Amino acid sequence: MATHFKRKGKRLLGIDRQSAIRFFFGGNAMISILVLGAICLFLAREAVLFFPQHQRDLEVFRLTGQEYANFVIEEMDEFTEVKSLADQAFYQEMNEAYGIQRGLVDCYGALNDRLFDNGEDLIDELEDARDELDDADGEEEETLAQADLDGIQSEWDDFLRAELGKADRKTIDSFGRLGEKEWQELLDAMASWDPVEDEPPALVNDAKAEMTKGMAAFDAARMQIGSAGSELARLRSEIIKITTEIKTEAVADMSSAARKKALLEGSVNAATEEARASLKAQAEAITIRENFPYSERIKALEGSREKHEAAVTSLKSGMQAGVAALPTEFASTEVETLVSRIRERTPGLFEYLDTSLKESADWRYDEPVSWLSSVSSFFFGKDWVTNSSFHDFYGLLPLFTGSLLISIIALIVAIPFSLGAAIYVNRLAGPRQQNFIKPVIELIGAIPSVVLGFFGIIVLGEALRQTSQLEWLSWVPGFPMQERLNILNAGLLLALMAVPTIFTLCEDAINNVPSSFTEASLALGGSKLQTVMRIVVPAAISGIFAAILLGFGRVIGETMVVLLVAGNQIAIPDFGLGVGVITQPAHTMTGIIAQEMGEVTADTIHYRALFSVGLVLFTISLLINISARRIIKRFGLAA
């Protein structure tokens, strides 16, 4: 009977329609799985091959003495950060206490440059006319020379008045230090300016003298701090030169066999006898050694440890004296904060120098490099430096930090908007509002990320920077912003991109809460808002949390927006700024892959380092998705 009622259809090669459809979709799924597996295997293979290659690179780094040089380089970098704070504090204090005086000096310089550029020929004529008057012999020549000079001087006076009349205060005084009164006083003083003598007006000289006198003590302390690292800077240059030469020779020695083989093969295939002889002579000139004499070459660093200790001692004493000489009263709280940071960081700098000096004293060029060192230097390395004349570093930490900070800001902004919109659309809005709001939010996901990136560069970034300049917002950490391309800008754009994902999943989770929960709450006298906040949201919390995790996976894997607007500065942000850290530029894991993958040579260490970053990113996304699915499966009333 069952056979009688079975649907019969046309068959092709013994396969009916339903079997073909089942095979088509099942085959597509299998192909997808195979392609995904192939991608994972290729990614893992290239990433895993990075670590042995990286270990060999670190061995050369140590054997050539570059690791020792790096101690001095990092010490100098730490000192430079404190020195930079002193420079920032000095110029900020100058702006606050002597803004008008600095404005007069800077605006005079700008006007001076403009007059020399536009009136170069006229100034040369004026100078030549004066020389001719001085060289005139006899009354008649003096009379002619004087007449000529008077004509050129009159022409210059007219030119000067015209140029000063055309000068725009906002253009010349780009920092807005001068008011209308001071600007007019400067123009009046410049009206009698002599371009041949090129002496600043008395007004400008007085302003410069007042500024120099008022800032003399601060400037002396700043200069003392800056000069404290002069010995260490000289030692750094000396050691870098020595170790770079050793590495160049060692790398050439490693490739000697391959180069000799290539030259010999080339000599066989050369077109002329002369070319064959030349290539063969070059090949014979290459010496292949079993082992490179690192122990002999490293002797060039003898005496560096004594110089290193003396340079660190000099730096500490100079820093201590310079910091002690810094003023204690300032014209603004910003300067006071900067100087406080210098005083707070100085003991830490001294401690770091002592630790680094001890580690460098214990350093040995022939100590083996373990595979664990290769792994840890990648995952916890603070530098990502490629195409360096000294040494390339592949440290994931600054890229991971940038990705994490941007993603956190994106979630902080996106979660309230997404969850609030989901609750409103699903539980509070009317049908017309639902039909309008939901498609509009989901439409955001259709905007190309490159378009949002351009919007961030041209509109949002500039708007944030201009807003941060407002005086009444100066209390906000990180304001005023120095860069329009930064973590905050990227985070806000990624928040916009994450809203559709989180909103849709949250709305689905809320919609899947059984209606009996809502009905019971309303029957017991609960208001609609109480029902939503105390019954519906807690019941859907697993789905909401899963939506947030998937939103996090969405933003941490975004490439184009962060590449365009995050600033692409490969450095761990300065967390000493507190919340203000979000106004600094940063780089991300996705951004570095997109930026550098097209420029690297296959199978190189740089190439495989990028694959390692990709594997980390893939692992993070995979863990996020697995966690979201498990949360929904385990706690899922709203699943």
Image (cartoon, rainbow, N blue to C red):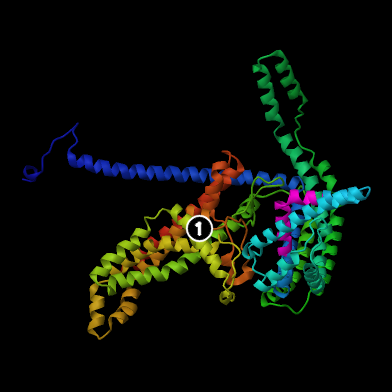
The answer to which image quadrant residue 246 occupies is: top right
- Using residue 302 as the reference point, say whether residue 551 is left or right of it: left
Q: Quadrant of residue 415?
A: bottom left
In the image shown, does 111 or 162 lie closer to the viewer?
Answer: 162
- Quarter of the image with the C terminus is bottom left
In the rendered view, would you say 224 is above or below 32? Answer: below
Q: Which picture quadrant has residue 170?
A: bottom right
Which residue is denoted by mark 1 in the rendering? 458
Q: Examine the residues drawn in magenta and state their main secondary structure.
A: helix
Q: Could you tell whether 146 is left or right of 53 in the image?
A: right
Q: Nearer the viewer, residue 242 or 450?
A: 450
Give the camera-side residue of 14 and 405.
405
Q: Is residue 227 magenta?
A: no
How many other residues sit within 10 Å of disc 1, few (<14), some (14-19) or many (≥20)? few
Where does the image place residue 379, in percent across and percent down from the top left?
A: 59, 55
- The amino acid sitting under disc 1 is Ile
Residue 313 percent coordinates (x, y): 85, 64
> Which residue is found at the position 55% from the left and 65% from the top?
465
Q: Residue at x 59, y 63 (%)?
A: 584
Magenta range is: 106-127
